[in-house]
Structure formats: structure tokens, C-alpha cells
């Protein structure tokens, strides 16, 4: 379905797994800062949605992103680190609208292979997901 079409990107980086995790956390926190964004997060939470960080579920979120774990392109191995976040938007927070962004990091000797996947919750939030994805890619490159 077009509305849930994810943005995916594979990045090779010299950053450590800890630095990748720190950058992910920082980008999400920046995206959820500011008066409107903090208010959106509180409103989404009051409406029963859970903004913020969560651990991806291999049987649901990965399928939504095309099954990046266990993919032959990644040698079928599990990532050294994985995290996800839901970042609501002010305009749609009461309906759970916004973006989900996932990061998976594999150790590859002297470098790390990172897959960033972001998915808007609706067609109207593609720009939100795209901007979040771009900021994340910049921070990890």
C-alpha cells in the first residue's frame, strides 16, 4: 500500500555501535522537542499511542519493512543492535499519525553496516518520515 511505503537505506559507517545508538537517540529526541512536538507526544500518549523508543518485533515491524533481518544480503545474521521509535505529528497525533523509524546495526569488522527504515503512518505524513530519515542518515554517515 502506498501510504505505508517505507524508506530504506543501507549505510556503511566507521561509527561504533554505541555512537550509532547515541545518534539515533539524539535525532529522535530533537524531532520530539519543541513545544508543538512535546504536546503532540503527550496528546498521542493520552490517546493510547506510545511515542518514543521501542524494540522492534521481528514478526511485525520487520515484515512491514520488507524483512531486513535474516535477509541474505546481511548474511542471515542478527544485528548487533536494533531500535525503533514512533515520532507523532501534531496534526495527527490523536489518530496515531506520524512516523516510525527503525535502525539495525551489524558489526562488519572495522566498520558497521546500518539499515535505516522509516515508514509514514499515512500518505499525509510522508514528508515527516522523509525528513526524519534524512536527518538520521546524515548523523550516521
Image (cartoon, rainbow, N blue to C red):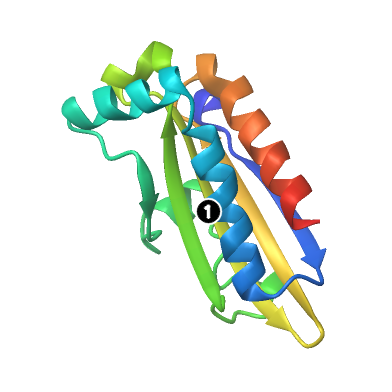
Q: Nearer the viewer, residue 24 or 67?
A: 24
Locate residue 109, reporting x and y percent.
78, 88
What residue does disc 1 label? 25
Q: In this view, does 86 lie above or below 45?
A: below
- Residue occupying the point 51% across, 24% down: 3
Locate residue 86, reporting x and y percent.
41, 40
State whether residue 89 appears in this view: no
Locate residue 54, reporting x and y percent.
36, 55
Q: Nearer the viewer, residue 131 or 76?
A: 131
- Residue occupying the point 38% across, 61% down: 55
Q: Nearer the viewer, residue 25 or 93?
A: 25
Residue at the extreme bottom of the image, as rendered: 109
Residue at the extreme front of the image, as rendered: 35
Q: Is residue 113 left or right of residue 66?
A: right
State whether residue 133 appears in this view: yes
Q: Is residue 14 left or right of residue 119?
A: right
Pick the quarter of the image with the C terminus. bottom right
Residue 73 quadrant: bottom right
Count of marks, rendered view: 1
Q: In this view, does 63 lie to the left or right of 16?
A: left
Locate residue 18, reporting x and y percent.
60, 73
10 Å neighbourhood of mark 1: few (<14), some, or many (≥20)? some
Circle 1 — which element?
Answer: helix
- Residue occupying the point 38% across, 44% down: 52
Q: In this view, does 29 lie above or below 72?
A: above
Q: Is residue 122 left or right of residue 49?
A: right
- Residue occupying the point 29% across, 19% down: 95
Residue 39 quadrant: top left
Amino acid at each position: 500500500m502506498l501510504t505505508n511505503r517505507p524508506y530504506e537505506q543501507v549505510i556503511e559507517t566507521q561509527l561504533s555501535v554505541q555512537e550509532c545508538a547515541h545518534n539515533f537517540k539524539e535525532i529522535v529526541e530533537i524531532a520530539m522537542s519543541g513545544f508543538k512536538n512535546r504536546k503532540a507526544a503527550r496528546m498521542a500518549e493520552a490517546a493510547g499511542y506510545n511515542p518514543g523508543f521501542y524494540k522492534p518485533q521481528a514478526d511485525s515491524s520487520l515484515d512491514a519493512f520488507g524483512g531486513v533481518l535474516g535477509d541474505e544480503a546481511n548474511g542471515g545474521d542478527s544485528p548487533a543492535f536494533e531500535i525503533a521509535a514512533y515520532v507523532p505529528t501534531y496534526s495527527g497525533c490523536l489518530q496515531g499519525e506520524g512516523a516510525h523509524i527503525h535502525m539495525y546495526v551489524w558489526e562488519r569488522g572495522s566498520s558497521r553496516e546500518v539499515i535505516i527504515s522509516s515508514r509514514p503512518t499515512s500518505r499525509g505524513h510522508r514528508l515527516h518520515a522523509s525528513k526524519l530519515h534524512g536527518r538520521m542518515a546524515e548523523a550516521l554517515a
